[in-house]
Amino acid sequence: MERYWNKPAETMDRGHIREIQLEKLRATVQNVYSNVPYYREKMQAKGILPGDVKTLDDLSSLPITTKQDLRDTYPFGLFAVPMEDIVRIHASSGTTGKQTVVGYTRRDIDMWAECMARCLVMEGADKSSRIQVSYGYGLFTGGLGAHYGAEKLGAVAVPASSGNTRRQITMLIDFGVTHLCCTPSYAMNIAETLADMGHTKDDLKLVSGCFGAEPWSSAMRAEIEARLGIRAYDIYGLSEIMGPAVSHECSRQNGLHIWEDCFIAEITDPDTDLPVPEGGAGDLVITTVSKEGFPLIRYKTRDICTLNTQPCECGRTHARMSKPAGRTDDMLIIRGVNVFPSQIESVLLSIGEVQPHYQIVVDRVNNLDTMTVEIEISETMFTDNVKGIEEFEKKVGGQLNSVLGVGAKIRLVEPRSIARSEGKAKRVIDNRKI
Ligand code: DLL
């Protein structure tokens, strides 16, 4: 039987969800208009007053917020409460520019823990669970976000953070951990280290894992599930909006339920920002309607997905987003063809002999983009004859070409030669930007 953390909230009918969203949206818009000069000016520039938001459809008339707006107001310019009411700060890593800072009130932290607890129950956790949190603790939201959810649930939280992978395995085994939270690439690293240490999945009590913070393919899911003997669930979130637990998969694993009593999701055209008809793919745009410290209106996540509001067999009524294929800003344009690293992963993992460790190197030679996919092969394959390797490279190259529509050079590399991830994996090295 399906279990819920907060059944009334998770299963209310969609009409009720929309009523709650409208009421909270109006309060949020009034709040930012009164308390965040940056928003007030943007709304004034569009000639909109808070009272103009009368229906949910009016949302689309409000200005879009982008990462650049967060940078322009760095560090605290979009906070909607005095600093005395902020109890925590998180920040994005800043790998693609200046870092962005997000503030939380005590109530925001509580709402976040509520969303995370709902997610953990969706994958079968309860009070008796032992949850190892191997997302990094710190300014990154993964560690503390998952941790507070586990505590809210009343489970045992094991704040492992990331790194020191052998010690992670010892804790998993000795503490009888039942649920693991980390990035999917770190889960693969943990699985590999488990075997290196002479253990098997039977030494674990793990039943499920809550993996997110980076795109990962269904093929990667199957690989992790087989190696760790668990069910692997996808969790999505971003620091600007909250952190992990904006959405999560239920047992049907057919999309990630977005907590719509806290967030309003729209799909828009990445170029024009205009709404895309229901079911169409586009940029996920999120408005927070339950946050006090750092409310965001129509935040353009740059994550590409679709939305589905059809009833789900699990009984939850909250809309489902498809597994994000990747960010528009991570999308590679190779000789004019759009390529997501996750597409490459799906093709590679559908080919038996390939290990789920790969890297994509993009370069420009004589004004022409080149893409080389470096892939690890198994020990046995590596000792095979050269001709076998050449043929194999050709086979992989052919399959990639037919799926991506653009040629890639394949380079098979020695087992264990690609750096293992402890957090978000770095899949792409784009030398064109240097
Ligand atoms: O990655 C928050 C998080 C922590 C989510 C732990 C899930 C688990 P940021 O560092 O701000 O926050 O990165 C957010 O990561 O816009 C997506 O592009 C990507 N991302 C997050 N979850 C997924 C996922 C955290 N499940 C950015 N699938 C987002 C694909 C994801 N991409």
Image (spheres, helix red, strand yellow):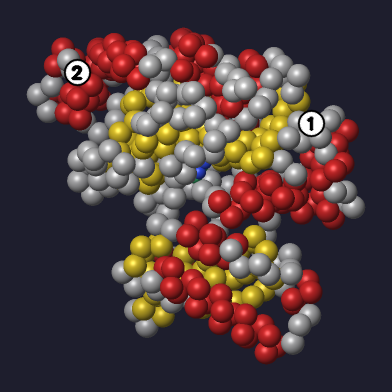
Kind of residue at badge 1: Val
- Residue furthest bottom in the image: 387
Give the mark, 2 or 1, whose residue is nearer the N terminus: 2
Residue 66 image label: none
Q: In the rendered image, which quarter is residue 340 located in? A: bottom left
- Report which residue position mark 2 lands on: 55
Tell me residue 35's x, y (percent). 29, 14
Kind of residue at badge 2: Thr
Q: On the rendered image, what quadrant is the N terminus found in? A: top right
Tell me residue 285's x, y (percent). 32, 35
Tell me residue 401's x, y (percent). 45, 74
Instruction: Tell me the residue at 49%/23% (across/down).
Output: 315
Check disc 2 and report its element: helix, strand or loop: loop
On screen, 293 above or below 253? above
Tell me residue 367's x, y (percent). 34, 79
Q: How many marks?
A: 2
Instruction: Tell me the residue at 61%/49% (across/down).
Output: 221
Q: Is mark 1 within 8 Å of ligand 1?
A: no
- Residue furthest left in the image: 47
Instruction: Tell me the residue at 20%/46% (across/down).
Output: 272
Mark 2 vs mark 1, CA separation in Å: 47 Å
Q: 26 or 234: nearer the eye?
A: 234
Mark 2 and 1 residues: CB-CB less than 8 Å, in contact? no
- Report which residue position mark 1 lands on: 177
